Image: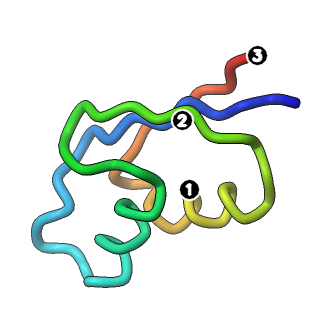
Amino acid sequence: MPRLKVTQVRSKVGNKPELRETLRSLGLKRINDVVVKEDRPEIRGMVYAVRHLIKVEEVE
């Protein structure tokens, strides 16, 4: 199953609490944190919500 490598590249400070919680749910705590998640619709939705704060790459 494909995976997504998600890297936080911008700060969550100054954003809405919902977006901060979404980053937390993805497992991102600070800038340059990296997590690898399964490519599922739920994860894609969270990634889409915070797309301006993160960088996403597909990995095998």
Residue 31, label in figure: none
Check the image and report above or below for 10 versus 18.
Answer: above
Q: Are marks 3 and 1 in contact (CB under 8 Å)?
A: no
What is the spatial separation of the Cα atoms under label 3 and label 1, in whole angstroms?
18 Å
Disc 1 residue type? Val
**Which residue, given by chain and number where applicable, does mark 2 sit on?**
56
Image coordinates of residue 44 in percent, x first then y, are: 68, 56
Label 3, secondary structure: give it.
Answer: loop
Task: Name the image quarter holding the N terminus.
Answer: top right
Residue 16 sits above or below residue 30 on the image: below
Label at residue 60: 3
**Residue density around tag 3, few if under 14, some if 14–19, many if 20 or more, within 10 Å:** few
- Report whether 8 appears left or right of 41: left
Give the residue pinned by disc 1. Answer: 47
Q: Position of residue 27 (x, y in %)?
A: 40, 51
Say whether marks 1 and 2 touch (CB < 8 Å).
Answer: yes
Task: Kindly give the residue lying farthest to the top in the view shown.
Answer: 60
Q: Amino acid at mark 3?
A: Glu
Disc 1 or 2, which lies upstream in sequence? 1
Where does the image place residue 58, in percent across and percent down from the top left? Answer: 68, 26
* Furthest residue toward right: 1
Measure the alpha-carbon separation of dots 1 and 2.
8 Å
Q: Residue at x 12, y 73 (%)?
A: 14
